[in-house]
Amino acid sequence: MTGSIMGQKYFTQIIFLISCCSSFFLQHSLAHDYAQALDLSFQYFEAQRSGPLPPNQRVTWRGDSAIEDGNAQGIDLVGGYYDAGDNVKFQFPMAYTITTLAWSVIEYRSQLEQLGQLQYALDAVKWGTDYFIKAHPEPNVLWAEVGDGATDHACWMRPEDMTTPRTAYKIDASNPGSDVAAETAAAMAAASIVFKDSDPDYANTLVTHATQLFNFADRFRANYDVSLPVVKNFYASLSGYNDELLWAAMWLLEATSEPYYQNYVVQNAVALGGLAGTGSIQFGWDVKYSGVHFLASKMLMEGRTGLNTDAFKAYQTQAESAICSALGMSGTPIKRTNGGLFHVQDWNNLQFVTGASFLITAYGDYLARNSQTLTCSGQIVQPSQLLALAQQQIDYVLGTNPKNFSYMVGYGTSYPQCPHHRGASIVSIKTDSAFVACDAGYEEWYQRPEPNPNVLSGAVVGGPDQDDNYTDERDNFQGGESATYNSGPIVGVLARLAGSSLSSTSSGNEFSEAAIHPHESRATNTQQDQQTRGESDEFDLKLDIHQELVSKWRRGKAMFFKVQCTVTNRNEHAVKKLILTSNELEGPVIGLHRLRGRKNSFTLPKKLKALQPGEAFNFTYVSVKAMKAEISVKQALLE
């Protein structure tokens, strides 16, 4: 504030009767706010955007970047996504990200629309496919990387400041890459389904590109990391290209219903390794076989396989074997940490967790829609059991784990503060436009022990190791770096879980609207507060607290209610050091910072230093009873 400042005064033990929840379910797995996690996931995609940012960009600490990509090669390659914590555009993982993101929209479009997230989903998909169209200027040409991984990793620079080379690398008939071409074909085919009703012309354009890319991949067969050695140390195609060929053909079949693609996946099932092994739930940017199996199973259950039913049943056998293994009911059970998390590898293990969770969720819904069940070792498995398994994995990611730690940045009260990410770890160019050079980034920002100055909201980091351990330090690139391909599949699962919550029917113990929306006027509340405080007018603390029921859902026989509370400062001066206390808020409280060692006390979020006059902030929590909770203002400081 300017001019003279009012004397500072603390208010203590001021009671507010808030018409919210009085008790919380202590098992966080039943109280996660999947809708919030979903919204944060789309914010993460915005944070990873390359190129000029749109007017509706919500992640405001980012700025325009890499706006001359492709200029040196005479082609417009502006746009797309940075893959993880660096500033390189790697086509292979980017394409997988868009494929899984589009698949999430295809399966859970109605839930996304119900949750008000559909447009964000469409924008996220189109940001990728718009770039893919640019990167595919000719039938047999695909630009597969922009930026050099070696020089980029030698620098710690926010994308807005980049001085590292923006060299672009392509594959063509002379230097082919079946894996990256086929994955891009899969992405564009899947995305065409997303846009076929809302923008049919755009969908047709995507199908044309997907068809050309598939033909290119199939005719000129080679691993792209052989043609482009520059990718070997970053995204080498270790599984080869056979899985991508089947994967792309499946998506083109789904998008076009052309018999050619059905014949392709049938006739090449064995030759391209689609039926090898006993089925695996491993699904990630390099391994697509399980995606092939599950997509084929969907077509089979929906009766879309014509005379090739037996061949598609062979694919389904692989999918069911993988699920039974994940359930631990047959075959070789998938490895888990002691906390119950699927474990494939220590380095970015959560990419496989989110991928497997999506496949399991979708398969359960395929079974349910077609009135079918699964049998594992002679035991009937209901679709609800599959959803429960996927939910358990996602709940672990969101904080139901031995450390009570969320691996999604910005979700919950305890989450990574120092994820390995250049842009998030350096002061925003919107805050300080001073150029941060390559070495200075390492010296001044990478080595800082403090939390990142920018919250990378929605980012799913690599996660804990096989012993459920995690180190929240910026140099933990194995577990602390997020990636877009971690988030593509989780969008679908979160939409499914959040959408189910909103569509649940209520029962007799429903939260009453009267309890959530008190009818007392603000003037009445203020008067009651003054009487309770017994303070002079000079130092009256005027805080408006408005509560709103935003969602409700059923878990078993219990009903849960999410309440959003908005606290507005009606004083003429800023409120600092606000501490709320209540012995009734024992579950997860989102939007307040729980004071360490004082489980009943909460303060403003760390990023909110003070509540300015007229300013408001929100916090939410979950209730199981329609009873009022006493929340006290333990401490407040007026400037």
Image (cartoon, rainbow, N blue to C red):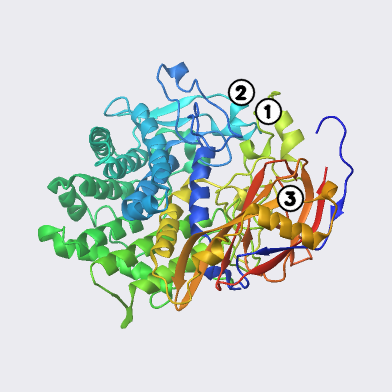
Q: Residue at the spot x=33%, y=76% of the render?
A: 382
Question: Neighbour class for label 2 at 10 Å: few (<14), some, many (≥20)?
Answer: some
Residue 163's disc is 2
Q: Earlier in the sequence, mark 1 or mark 2?
A: 2
Q: At numbered mark 1, what does the secondary structure look like: helix, strand or loop?
A: helix
Tell me the kind of residue under disc 2: Thr
Image quadrant where one finds the C terminus: top right
Q: Is residue 607 left or right of residue 82?
A: right
Contact flag, marks 1 and 2 (Cβ < 8 Å): yes
Q: In the drawing, does residue 563 fall left or right of residue 568?
A: left
Judge the density around disc 3: few (<14), some (14-19), many (≥20) Cα neighbours within 10 Å: some
Which quadrant of the figure has residue 580?
bottom right
Q: Nearer the viewer, residue 170 or 440?
A: 440
x then y, percent, for residue 440:
73, 29
Q: How many marks?
A: 3
Identify residue for label 3.
542
Residue pointed to by mark 1: 438
> Residue 243: horizontal and vertical position, in percent?
32, 51
Judge by depth and name the residue closer to the eye, 57 or 624: 624
Asked which secondary structure carries label 3, the reply is loop
Circles 3 and 2: CB distance less than 8 Å? no
